[in-house]
Every structure is written in C-alpha cells, then in structure tokens.
Amino acid sequence: MGFPGTWMTESESMVYRVVPKCACSTIGQIMYFSDHGQFFDGDIHDAKGGMHKWAFDQSQGLISTNVRNHASFSFTCVRNPYTRILSSFFDKICGIQRNGKRYRGNLVPTLIYNYGIEVGGDDGKGEFDQIASFRRFLLFARDTIRWRRPMDPDIHWSAMSGHVSTFIVNGGQYDRIFWTEKFNDGMQGVLDKTDTQHAIALSDIPRFNESEGHGPKRAHAVEDYFDDLSMHLVYEIYKQDFELFKYDFHDPSNKMPIGEIDLDEVHAKLGD
C-alpha cells in the first residue's frame, strides 16, 4: 500500500502525512518555502514539482526508503472533529470548487435528492437552513463511513485516525502530532527539529486556507449545529479521534484539546 497522502521536502528535511481539513495547505507551503525560499504560486495541492508527493510515481521510492528508515523528522496535524466535519460540509458540499464546479460531480444532487439537503442554490450563496442541512449531511457521512453507502467515505470527512494509521501500519513512525488549534506551537516544534534550507518565521507566514470563500459562511456558533443526536453520530464516527487526539466530545463549543497526545498510544492503537 505504501504511504498515501505523504509529502516530503526535496531536501528530505521533513516528512508530512497529510490529513485533509487540518491546515494541510499552510503546512505544504511552509515545506515548499523551507526548500525554495518562496511560496508555491497557487494551491500547493496543485504543485507538480518542488516537493515529493506519494501521488508522483517518481517520488514513491524516495518516500518509502526515507520513511521506512525513519531518516527524517515525520509529523502530522489534527483538528477538532466537530469543526473539521463542519468545515467539510461548508467547503465540499455547499461550496463551488476551484474548477468552478460542484465537488465530485453528482455528489451534491444525490445528497439533495436522497437526504433533503440544501446548499444555498447553484452558487452556494443563497439563504438556507444551515443547521438542518448539516445534520442531514451528518447522516450521510455516517452512512458512508459505517456502511460505505451510498459511496465510500470521502477523505475530507473520513476519520483522522484512519489517515494517520496508514503511515504507521506500513512502517512509518511519527515524531510529532500537533493540533491545528495550536498551530504555531506545533509547527515550531517541527521546525526546531529540522535543518531547513531557508529560515522560517511562523509569525510572518500567511494562512493558506484554500477552501475559504468556496461556500457560504457559517451563520451560527459551532455548538448550535450539534444537538444530542448529532453529537451521538459524531461520536460514532470519530470516537477514536476524540480519544487519541484528546478533544472534548462532551462540549462542541470547546475546540481546544483537553490533554496531551501520547505518541506511544497512537502508534500502539493505530499500528495493528
């Protein structure tokens, strides 16, 4: 299976396992800058050179050798499951994507027809009941993850532990896992352990939120989207994410972690 979703700097200074909706655009740009002294002009996900990605055939051998030998500092970044699934809804379901089209073609029409979801009209900017539609989307997300119906789960709302685990199962070892909510502290911890070609001052780095502006703005506080049933569904889907990455399941309004990530626990529980 190898190391899907893994990026590595050309200098092999660091290895990153991408977790979608967890600051991956910003992290990718920092990696690119650390080698080249400038940011990639565009969405880093579209970059076809300047860094190694598992999606590139020519990069796979280099990434495999590096990761299995643990030759570079390896890390990933996680996010509160409540805010992550909300972000996925507004970006991927309600939003118009970079190509000017809806995400995954007929996905949104299927959701409208089968689950009664509204998305704000053709341009995603109309008024609609965000809370009701999001809760219906949660049912769909649960169906894809639990039963793989009506489709396989999408990478943007499948559990973070699933993304994180492939790296471990195939022979990788994380040196650091940090939280999006404490991004500067976490990323600085990575940079302190790596020898980069170009110095990086995180306070000067913009946030490359490539999904921003794709869809309607969230009209309510995070906790308003989650009633008792919604919280139950979220826990059913993301139980391991809450436990391993130390987020507060009981309070959707608290996006901050409530404990320290235990790397030994993560490797033990996700390495089977």
Image (spheres, grey):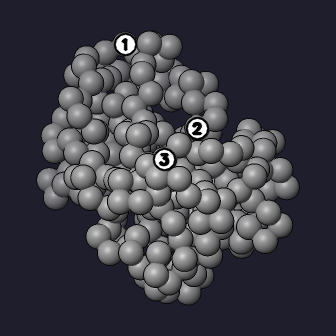
Q: Which mark is residue 180?
A: 2
Q: Across the whole image, how many numbered discs are drawn on residues?
A: 3
Q: Which mark is residue 254?
A: none
Residue 225 locus on image (x, y percent): 71, 56
Q: First in sequence, mark 2 or 3: give its number.
A: 2
Instruction: Using a 10 Å C-alpha cutoff, classify the residue at mark 2 as few (fewer than 14 neighbours), some (14 to 19) or many (20 or more).
Output: many
Instruction: Using a 10 Å C-alpha cutoff, classify the residue at mark 1 as few (fewer than 14 neighbours), some (14 to 19) or many (20 or more).
Output: few
Q: First in sequence, mark 2 or 1: give its number.
A: 2
Residue 9 locus on image (x, y percent): 29, 35
Is residue 106 visible in the rendered image? The answer is yes
Image point 53% across, 53% down: which residue? 127
Asked whether 130 or 181 is in front, the reply is 130
Question: Which is in the foreground here, disc 2 or disc 1?
Answer: 2
- Separation (CA) of disc 1 from disc 3: 37 Å
Up-down relation of residue 262 to residue 102 (above or below)? above
> Residue beneath label 3, please?
216
Question: Which is in the foreground here, disc 2 or disc 3?
Answer: 3
Residue 153 locus on image (x, y percent): 47, 73
